[in-house]
Image (cartoon, rainbow, N blue to C red):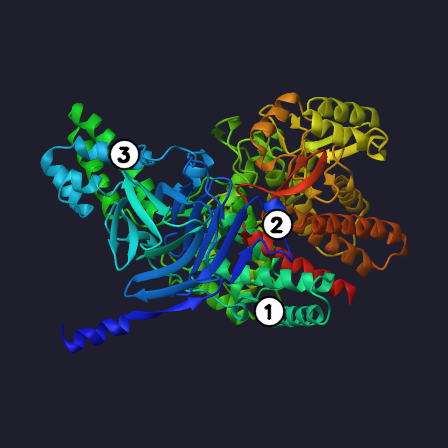
Amino acid sequence: MTVLALAFLAQLAVTARPVTPVLAFPDQALDDTAAYRGYQTRFFRDAARNTLQIYMDQRSARVVHLLADADNASVGFTARDATSHTAALDWGAPGATISASGRTRRLTHDLLAHTPTLHVGSFVLGSMRVERDLQYFQHVGDPFRRIPYAIDDVDHLIAALDSLPPEIRTRHLARLRARTLPELQARLHPRATLRNAGGRWTARVVQVTLDARDTLTLELSVNAADASASQAGDSISFMTRRTGDLALRVAVTTTARALTPLTRTQIFTPDFLAFLDATRSRGAAVAPTDTAAIRARRMERQVSGVELLVSREKLMAGLPTYATYFGRDMLMTALMMRPIWQHQAQEAVIATALRKLGPHGDVSHEEALGDQAVRESAGEYARLITQWRAASQRQDRAAAAALLARADTVLRTMRVTRENYHMIDDEYQFAIVVARWITDPTVPASVKQSFLRDASDGGGTRAERLLKELALIAELTAPYAANPIASNLIAFSRGEPLGWGSASWRDSGAGYAGGRYAMDINAIWVPHALESLGEILSAMRTLGISTTSAAAGTSPLARYVSTPSLLQQAITTWRGASKHFLVQRSSDQVRAAVQARLAAMPPEEQAWWQSRTTTASALTDSLSLLAVSLDSNGVPLAVANTDPATELFLADAGAASADDVSDVLRTVRLFARPYPAGLFVDRIGPVVSNDAYAPPTVWNYFVKDPYHGPRVVWGREVNLFLLGVAGQIARSQQAGRTTDAAYVAELQSAMDKVRTAVEQSGFHTELWSYGFDQGQLRALRYGSGGDIQLWSTTDLAVQYVLSKSRR
């Protein structure tokens, strides 16, 4: 090798260096370690400063490495002992080692297995979505040496290729950089090899992507003097030669593209960072167990969490399971973080959403990238080939040629990011984010003008794309504005398993109790989005940004542009949509509903709540709530829920009317009312829903699918409530009415009650749950909850806003 070549390789290489975790969970100072039930995780920065998370779940002995880069890939394996039970694992060293060479980035760390024999298998290297599915569908416990975990879409692609005439198959295989079908099939699953070299037994597991563009590698090694090793199919076994634990070295490498991370000074306002420094200083001046010290440490963890999620290219929704763009998560976070984010961060959010708009102006809900994009493309290719065969059989040459050309294009663009537009709440959230930015007096007009006129992303200027999105909102909301009956509300489409697909934030099967019309969309988001639409159009005119394209024709948006009074009428009509969802129960009805729900609970749970509700004042008051949804006939499904907190948060400044006060108290009292009559659970927080007032069929929905059910608290909802109540208190105090003293005191009491319960739970994460242990209720980490979740970091905004109110 020439000296020049050696010099070039030296430039590409990054010398291996030790690193310590940026964050680790659970933290004994901040978390109830027992609530994590053997779950441990660490977050590192790799050689490109991209996030790499490692987590171990002792319940399944699953070890997963999430590579939160431009491909959102993961490397996972399962560890078992000699009896095929889950192996007890621990970290083997406090840190890790990182390096890079050319496109390849590598991280090495050590594990300690508390077993003399360790079997490892169930290797999954690829999209994190595959790992998520593996765990969600409970395949982690499958025996080793079975057929590797299959991806249906990819199997369908292989079958489709196999069905093609040889000349077409060869051409399509070339698109995937394969000469033969067996060569392509060899990429479907990771390949494991074992060798003894350099004094170590090393198992090397390699996964080449289907299109052969990238490679993921996992290496597991032990000192050959301390242990022996063997291979059986796709599983590897290590056996110690001595008594004691087994030291296992783990290395992960990737060739995927890296992101460009942002720092806290690029994300947060100087005022917030000064507040963070002051909080840290106060915490350092007291004992580590003092409340001030714990608060400072938690805030620092959350700020670090934001840095791990935010890059120049995108904001990731969470880690480990959602290390991709999620429109709703990004938009909700942008709204809640407005007090502490620089306007450039808000502009990055708006630019990302505009860049990803669909052809009709839809906001993208989620991106599929890397292996996930390949996976979805494979499914599309298989469907096109099926249609091509049908067209060929009926001798429709034109249709067959068009389908084959489309299939070829899918193969050629397999890795292009694919957008998902099936959610409907983000349309309305986006308009509100834009309105709050464009009317913000602290953002210079020149910045707004330059931003909106920018066309660097293609597809016209940002202003033109924004008008397309506003036109979609106006069109979707026009039927109800013209005729305000329930059947004209924004509706979910048909879906499984309950008949109507949950296409808003409660996006589990049971989230909206099987309803067709979601309360949060129709009673909260749409009215505010229409108000925002008017504010955006007015601001654009003031800035000299043309709205001519929106005024053309007879579309609803064109009518609103030419006749603003029509938009005001639509806003007024939509503000009344909450009447469809209003549910009222007398004290007798409350008591009967609660007792019936308790009677259907498991004995331990039933006994706990009965001991607290038989004489509780919560049962002696009547109840008013907004149902979570309406069924297909427009009948409210009376699930009490946290969504009205969003209305508290979005409420504009100004003097509150009597109706406003009544609506605020309805929400606040529901949050503070003890479960199972209300939402509040002591030492846990406000549960996301309470199905006691709904039919028994709904109870069964939430038992089977608890993700948005009565056993779960969502950090997002807690923060919306706290920010909303703080805003309502400030609003009332600014009005200066002494008659509001009792009202403010009740709001303050409810806010303090919720904050205290959440602090006692020990969780400030995406979501958490509770369970019963020897007759006692305790907080628990929810199984699929994110360790770091973008909208849960909005607790930072809560702390900042509350600190200002105390000044």
Q: Nearer the viewer, mark 2 or mark 3?
A: 2
What residue is disc 2 on?
33
Q: SS for tag 1? A: loop
> For the residue marked with disc 3, what is the amino acid?
Asp
Q: SS for tag 2? A: helix
Give the CA distance from mark 3 to mark 1.
49 Å
Could you say where residue 103 lies in the image, as x and y percent from the top left?
29, 62
In what quadrant of the picture does the N terminus appear? bottom left
Give the CA distance from mark 2 to mark 1.
33 Å
Residue in the image at 58% along x and 46% along y:
36
| Nearer-the-camera pick, 676 or 368 | 676
| Label 2 environment density (alpha carbons within 10 Å; few <14, some 14–19, many ≥20) | some
The tag on residue 413 is: none
What residue is disc 3 on?
155
Could you say where residue 290 lies in the image, as x and y percent from the top left?
73, 62
The answer to whether 188 appears left or right of 677 in the picture is left
Q: Nearer the viewer, mark 3 or mark 1?
A: 3
> For the residue marked with disc 2, what is the amino acid?
Thr
Residue in the image at 57% along x and 37% along y:
707
Outermost residue, left side: 167
Disc nearer the start of the sequence (2/1): 2
What residue is disc 1 on?
269
| Nearer-the-camera pick, 390 or 698 | 698
